[in-house]
């Protein structure tokens, strides 16, 4: 058997594989002291040392950091604390003009200009009868302001009677029955002659003559028409498929026809060929105590 053997009763044969390491990794492998002397200095960093500055904080514990002096951020001359009492100019004095908020001070009288117009002021009744007589008739309509209604024609007021009216009729003055009949009858040249006697007759009591037309069928359809047995023999096999046109089904595999028996088939399984049984047992620290 080839490959790794799962059963413990069978020994696994040694296998050889091609290495995937590169040359740089192979050169770093230790073989002997003589080989290490030949490759000495290949892994050193060379003259690329990063010298730390002696000024400022020292990263190494062997070097002492020098004392540093900084400028303070507090104000140089602090301001003296303010007194609790307000200083000059801090009081807000209320004006003596206008509305007073203090109840001990009375408000001065105010004069307001009227916003009414003269026409509205004239309509105010003051109580003087003689003054009211001076405005009598101001709102009444003046002369020639009334719209007088005409006494001719239909009267709108119910107290006035409308006169009788005479209307002209709209019918024609001279109109007789014979004129109406003449207007309804067709004139000369207005009759429509009957259909032609040639062709199809729309009148039922006239027979239409037989008509002959050209057929619209094709030669392929005409060849399929059955006339007699002798002619049918001439077209025998026209509708059948020719040689090498039939689709031959394979006798191998599944047979779609019910009269053909399908042979037994074998399939390859999809399971892994060599499965490791090491994962079947629980590993360390997998037990719940």
Image (tube, rainbow, N blue to C red):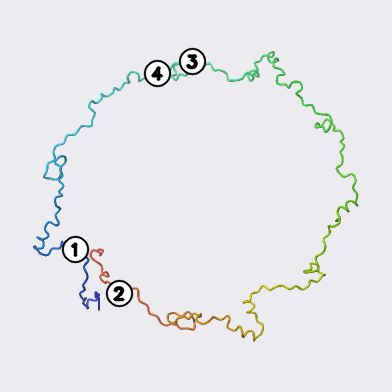
> Which disc number belongs to residue 34?
none
- Residue identified by numbered label 1: 23
x, y percentage for residue 144?
77, 22
Which quadrant of the figure has residue 118?
A: top right
Q: Earlier in the sequence, mark 4 or mark 1?
A: 1
- Residue identified by numbered label 3: 108
Badge 1 crowding class, 10 Å Cα cut-off, few under 14, some 14 to 19, many 20 or more, is: few
Tell me if label 1 and label 3 are in contact, CB under 8 Å.
Answer: no
Q: Describe the element under mark 4 as helix, strand or loop.
A: loop
Alpha carbon separation for disc pair 2 and 1: 36 Å
Q: Earlier in the sequence, mark 1 or mark 3?
A: 1
x, y percentage for residue 164?
87, 35
Alpha carbon separation for disc pair 3 and 2: 115 Å
Q: Describe the element under mark 2 as helix, strand or loop.
A: loop
Question: Is residue 150 toward the left or the right of residue 217 in the image?
Answer: right
Alpha carbon separation for disc pair 4 and 2: 105 Å
Q: Earlier in the sequence, mark 4 or mark 3?
A: 4
Q: From the viewer's side, name the closer residue of 153 and 21.
A: 21
- Residue identified by numbered label 4: 93
Q: From the viewer's side, name the closer residue of 129 and 149.
A: 149
Q: Describe the element under mark 3 as helix, strand or loop.
A: loop
Q: Earlier in the sequence, mark 2 or mark 1?
A: 1
> Which disc number belongs to residue 273?
2
Alpha carbon separation for disc pair 1 and 3: 111 Å
Question: Which tag is nearer the camera, tag 2 or tag 1?
Answer: 1
Where, quadrant-wise, is the C terminus in this rendering?
bottom left
Tell me if label 2 and label 1 are in contact, CB under 8 Å.
Answer: no
Badge 4 crowding class, 10 Å Cα cut-off, few under 14, some 14 to 19, many 20 or more, is: few
Question: Which tag is nearer the camera, tag 4 or tag 1?
Answer: 1
Tell me if label 4 and label 3 are in contact, CB under 8 Å.
Answer: no
- Which residue: 78% across, 72% down? 209
């Amino acid at each position: 058997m080839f490959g790794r053997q799962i059963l413990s009763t069978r020994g696994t044969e040694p296998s050889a594989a091609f290495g995937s390491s590169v040359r740089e990794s192979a050169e770093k492998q230790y073989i002997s002291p003589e080989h290490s002397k030949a490759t000495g200095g290949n892994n050193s960093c060379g003259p690329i040392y990063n010298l730390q500055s002696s000024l400022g904080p020292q990263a190494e514990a062997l070097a002492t950091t020098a004392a540093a002096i900084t400028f303070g951020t507090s104000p140089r001359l602090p301001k003296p604390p303010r007194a609790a009492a307000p200083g000059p100019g801090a009081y807000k004095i209320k004006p003596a003009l206008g509305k007073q908020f203090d109840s001990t001070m009375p408000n001065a009288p105010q004069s307001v200009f009227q916003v009414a117009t003269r026409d509205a002021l004239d309509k105010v009744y003051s109580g003087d009868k003689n003054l009211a007589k001076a405005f009598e008739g101001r709102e009444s309509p003046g002369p020639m302001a009334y719209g007088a209604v005409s006494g001719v024609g239909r009267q709108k007021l119910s107290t006035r009677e409308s006169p009788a009216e005479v209307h002209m009729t709209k019918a024609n003055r001279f109109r007789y029955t014979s004129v109406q009949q003449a207007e309804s009858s067709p004139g000369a040249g207005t009759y429509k002659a009957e259909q032609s006697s040639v062709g199809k007759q729309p009148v039922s009591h006239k027979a239409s003559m037989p008509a002959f037309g050209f057929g619209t069928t094709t030669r392929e359809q005409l060849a399929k028409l059955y006339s007699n047995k002798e002619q049918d023999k001439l077209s025998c096999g026209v509708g059948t498929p020719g040689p090498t046109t039939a689709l031959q089904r394979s006798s191998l595999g599944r047979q779609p026809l019910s009269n053909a028996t399908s042979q037994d088939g074998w399939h390859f399984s999809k399971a892994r060929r060599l499965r490791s049984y090491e994962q079947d047992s629980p590993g360390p620290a997998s037990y719940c105590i």
